[in-house]
Image (tube, coloured by chain):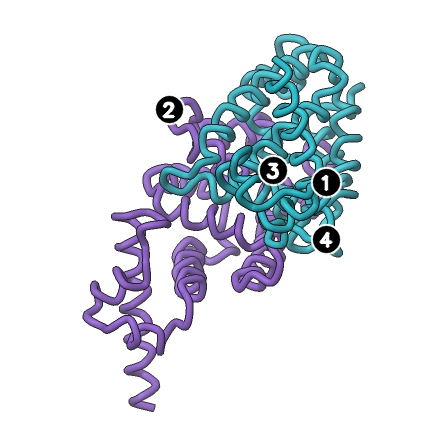
Chain colours: A cyan, B purple
Amino acid sequence: MAAKTRSDQRRAEIVRAALEVIAERGYRGASLAAVAERVGLTQQGLLHHFPTKEALLVAVLEERDQWDATPSAREWRMELLASLVEYNAMRPAIVQTFSALLGESVTEDHPARGYFTRRYAGVREDMARLLRAEYGERLPSGLTPEQAAPLLVAVLDGLQYQWLLDPENVDMPGAFRNFLVLLGEQGS
Amino acid sequence: MAAKTRSDQRRAEIVRAALEVIAERGYRGASLAAVAERVGLTQQGLLHHFPTKEALLVAVLEERDQWDATPSAREWRMELLASLVEYNAMRPAIVQTFSALLGESVTEDHPARGYFTRRYAGVREDMARLLRAEYGERLPSGLTPEQAAPLLVAVLDGLQYQWLLDPENVDMPGAFRNFLVLLGEQGS
């Protein structure tokens, strides 16, 4: 048990260090060597906890998912989601990491494919629950929560690419608020 | 002039071959070596026309943009866009290539970054024009065409990732038609 706990603590430290390195140097700069140095491990020692850069990045994104999901999904509201987009607009490095890894994940046999496939199935369910809490069984447009959920998720992801490529010309939080208008927020 | 034309023809042949190789083997399998073999060039000979895999892939995507833009953007209608999504759902390999390269392009100094940044500025303009032709100065939701255009583009891109990851559970053309309902198509 003690060994397990130490190993868990070590993993958590590594994930936190990776997040820092990503924030400072971006996706490409976040090498296993840089992360190992930050936590005072050899690269070999780091590989004991995370066999590949992709495995480490997935752990970082899972950690972010947990933070973002606080407060629990049951308490999510559309306004909170808009705030999350505003928050993301202040942390381009992690959004870049997410977006770059998502892009890679659709290629053949990519190690992050499983993570993203599971994540999207879960996020679509969470968003459908949120939409149902907000609008009931039908949105103002007539769509069901299950029909609107993938669109909500797609807009969140798609806007991130446009914003990362051209932050001067793309107002990601403003665009997301416009999407809430499309969903029917003007009636609230 | 003749030399220029031969070089242009050669480039066009290479791009066509690359598209075939992508369709058969996917993004990762589309190596410069495989493309060179297809057109009967040495890899060195191919590098004369396209210095990197990224440069070749950008040329492939530019070629696709030109095809997709026929008929000219002025004649685009929402229905045509829905048909394009249906068509894309039958060609996963090129959609995968686009999505993977888009993901890479948001990383530091990526060679495809310029292409995507320019492309999105242009596509947002095209979509705003299309939305104006369909709805006039205001959509039923009250959004302007310029406000709705980045959302339309984001949904197209975002749905592609969800679909590529989980084609069994994500009906990309159906989801896009639901987005048209959100835009206000139910009133047409």
- Image point 44% across, 36% down: which residue? A111
Give x and y (percent) for residue A29: 63, 54
Q: Name the residue under label 1.
A: A175
Alpha carbon of mark 4 to alpha carbon of mark 3: how far?
15 Å
Residue B157, visible in the rendered structure: no
Q: Name the residue under label 3.
A: A157
Chain under numbered label 1: A
Label 3: state its secondary structure. Answer: helix
| Dot in front, 3 or 1 | 3
Do marks 2 and 1 both belong to one polypeptide chain? Answer: no
**Towards the viewer: B98 or B109:** B109
Q: Are marks 4 and 2 in contact (CB under 8 Å)?
A: no
Do marks 4 and 2 both belong to one polypeptide chain? Answer: no
| Position of residue A52 in the picture relative to residue A145 (left or right) | left
Q: Mark 4 points at which residue?
A: A167
Alpha carbon of mark 3 to alpha carbon of mark 2: how far?
20 Å
**Towards the viewer: B81 or A46:** A46
Label 2: state its secondary structure. Answer: loop
- Image point 65% across, 30% down: which residue? A10
Which circle's residue, 4 or 1, is located before the other in the chain? 4
- Image point 43% across, 27% down: which residue? B171
Q: In which quarter of the image is residue B86?
A: top left
Alpha carbon of mark 2 to alpha carbon of mark 1: how far?
30 Å
- Residue type pointed to by label 3: Asp
Q: Do the residues labelled 4 and 1 touch (CB within 8 Å)?
A: no
Label 1: state its secondary structure. Answer: helix
Give x and y (percent) for residue A184: 71, 23
Alpha carbon of mark 3 to alpha carbon of mark 1: how far?
12 Å
Q: Name the residue under label 2.
A: B168
- Residue type pointed to by label 1: Ala
